[in-house]
Amino acid sequence: GAVVSQHPSWVICKSGTSVKIECRSLDFQATTMFWYRQFPKQSLMLMATSNEGSKATYEQGVEKDKFLINHASLTLSTLTVTSAHPEDSSFYICSAPGQGIYEQYFGPGTRLTVT
Amino acid sequence: AQTVTQSQPEMSVQEAETVTLSCTYDTSESDYYLFWYKQPPSRQMILVIRQEAYKQQNATENRFSVNFQKAAKSFSLKISDSQLGDAAMYFCAYRRGFTGNQFYFGTGTSLTVIP
């Protein structure tokens, strides 16, 4: 089946710095990708919809200036956490829809720890 | 955003027995899809089963089946002949039918399988 990868799988950064997370569709094109955030033992919360060639759509309450999303190609979306703080520490998961109406391929996630 | 509720934070089942996980959702839309996803300790999301809202027949996938009650907005998952490998977090998810591919997830149920 289709594969979505994320890089890095785990990143530690210092408070105040920015960190970029990549989400790639490896064997299919994705004009849309989704970014989720998951706190320990909690659900996946949809943060934003990444649209190739246009601005991302953010869910209510998500700071667009804090979580910058770029979808520059049909296989790559990036999430940049700017001026990270310890409360941004979380597990970030991306997903991309497949060709069928049911398929949704999830990346393996990125664990962000801000010290 | 749609609301998906899982009222059982934790469940346990004896190996080979049957367990049912509950899910309710709130929507004003008539066309949508419902899913159950499994998230093992690896954090990789795995699709367990899906149900189209327009179908009255309950979906079944091997040992997994659902009880879809559209009027009650209920979507429970039944796992028969539980296996140790079934131990994981289970998330109920909602996806709009007409627009977008965003998934909205429930709060999750942690399933323990007792040998």
Image (cartoon, rainbow, N blue to C red):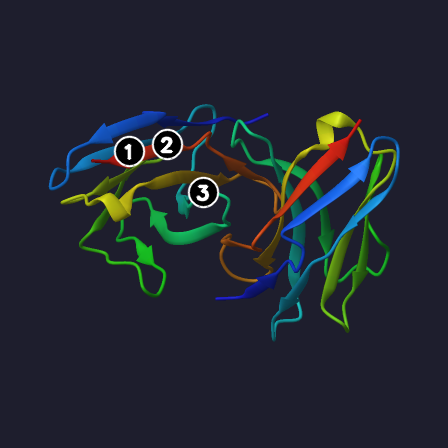
Residue of label 2: A110
User: Which mark, by number, is residue A21?
Assistant: 1
- The picture quadrant where one finds residue B98 is bottom right
- Residue A87 location (% of width, % of height): 27, 48
- Residue B25: percent from left, percent from top: 64, 65
> Which tag, 2 or 3, sits closer to the chain's start?
3
The quarter in which the N terminus of chain A is drawn is: top right
Question: In the image, residue A10 lies at what x, y percent?
Answer: 33, 26
Q: Chain of mark 2?
A: A
Q: Which mark is residue A40?
A: 3
Between label 2 and label 3, give the one nearer the viewer: 3
Q: Which residue: 72% across, 32% down?
A: B86
Mark 2 belongs to which amino acid?
A: Thr
Quadrant in the rendering for residue A73: top left
Residue nearest the viewer, comparing B88 with B46: B88
Residue visible at 88% across and 33% down in the picture: B81
Camera-nearest residue between B3 and A48: B3
Q: Nearer the viewer, mark 1 or mark 2?
A: 2
The amino acid at mark 3 is Pro
- Image position of B14 (left or right of B27): right
Q: Are marks 1 and 2 on the same chain?
A: yes
The Cα–Cα distance between marks 1 and 2, rounded to whole angstroms, is 7 Å
For label 2, count other residues whose C-alpha is less than 10 Å away and answer few (under 14), some (14-19) or many (20+). Answer: many
* Marked residue nearer the N-terminal end (3 or 1): 1
Pointer 1 local density, CA inside 10 Å: few below 14, some 14–19, many at least 20: many
State yes or no: discs 3 and 1 in contact (Cβ < 8 Å): no
User: How far is mark 3 from mark 1, CA to CA?
Assistant: 19 Å
Left or right, A33 with respect to A87, comes to right
Q: Quadrant of the C terminus of chain A?
A: top left
Give the answer, above or below, for where A101 lies relative to B14: below
Do callouts 3 and 1 point to residues on the same chain? Answer: yes
